[in-house]
Amino acid sequence: MVEKIKILITGGAGFIGSNLCEYFLAKDYKVVCLDNFSTGKRENLHNFFSNPDFELIEGDIRDLQTCHDAVQGVSYVLHQAALGSVPRSIKDPITTNEVNISGFLNMLVASRDAKVKRFVYAASSSTYGDSESLPKTEDKIGKPLSPYAVTKYVNELYADVFAKTYGMEVIGLRYFNVFGRRQDPNGAYAAVIPKFVMQLMQHESPVINGDGTFSRDFTYIDNVIQMNELAMLTQNEEALNTVYNTAFGERTTLNDLVTMLKDELITFDPEIGKVEISYGPNRLGDIPHSLASIDKAKKYLNYNPRFSMKSGLKEAVTWYWENLKK
């Protein structure tokens, strides 16, 4: 019998992490999930507990010993654990820094010491900061606009140093506005798509920050899973020790997003078409426009995203309707 490959997914109880757990368990890997449940949810893991190839470690990446314990016997690390949200980081920069920088460094050190084959981590499009160039290309960034963006940029710097200094194989994935099944619609820092879907389902007016002309490269979860797998398994030496935009490569304004959401939701409830949209002030730290070039990922990782914004939204809205409708 061939021994199954063991991978560690930090933040595995979160939206992206739990989708990665599900995918790699289905692919016959042994999966270790490390999560402290500060933002992750136990219900995201319920379907995995009966799987003998799944192991949960309840712990915090801010504790170095926990990180050392989690990487034992692990071939690959998919590091998703972080405190997300620009507004959260503005309100509490210290905790954001402790989790996203100190916790990240702990995971790098533990992975180095355990001689993990490759460390793939969630980077962020927030790293582009005040750069106005579109589309965003990996080699051209601006100054960060929030504490969160600072932490994600520092992750990239540390990853680069560990690759050069310790010979680690490291790849960063700059996520662009990921959405899809299991994304939490509740709480002060909920992402815009599940939040708007929930409000529309309840016939409440979604509030758009600004005039709705800000645009984002919304990226369906299955494209993100694809990128993680490609980064984890690539045999291309040229693909290593760098960062890649993880996106579809199209941008959608917030006004267009609401229209698209309504179009999908009225198939379930025609009354949603009558819900009015409200507008509020721009949000501090927000980047006006976000659009990724995915040429680098196509070239080095053979990335070919399967889901456009529209096709991903159809999948996501159906999931939200079936799982969130009270």
Image (cartoon, helix red, strand yellow):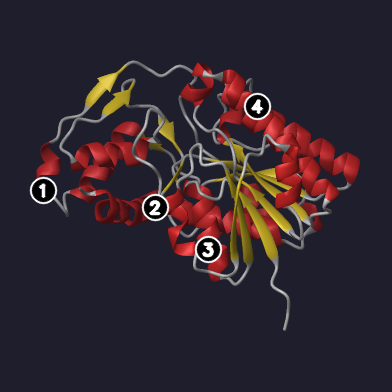
Residue with the mark numbered 4:
98
- The answer to whether marks 3 and 4 mark residues whose Cβ atoms lie closer than 8 Å is no
Residue with the mark numbered 1:
270
Among numbered discs 4 and 2, the one appearing first in the sequence:
4
- The answer to whether marks 4 and 2 mark residues whose Cβ atoms lie closer than 8 Å is no
Among numbered discs 3 and 4, the one appearing first in the sequence:
3
Tell us which disc is closer to us: 4 or 2.
4
Residue with the mark numbered 2:
181
Among numbered discs 4 and 1, the one appearing first in the sequence:
4
Tell us which disc is closer to us: 1 or 2.
2
Residue with the mark numbered 3:
23
Q: CA distance from mark 3 to mark 2?
A: 13 Å
| Quarter where residue 185 is shown | top left
Among numbered discs 1 and 2, the one appearing first in the sequence:
2
| Quarter where residue 142 is shown | top right
Name the kind of residue labelled 4 in the image: Glu
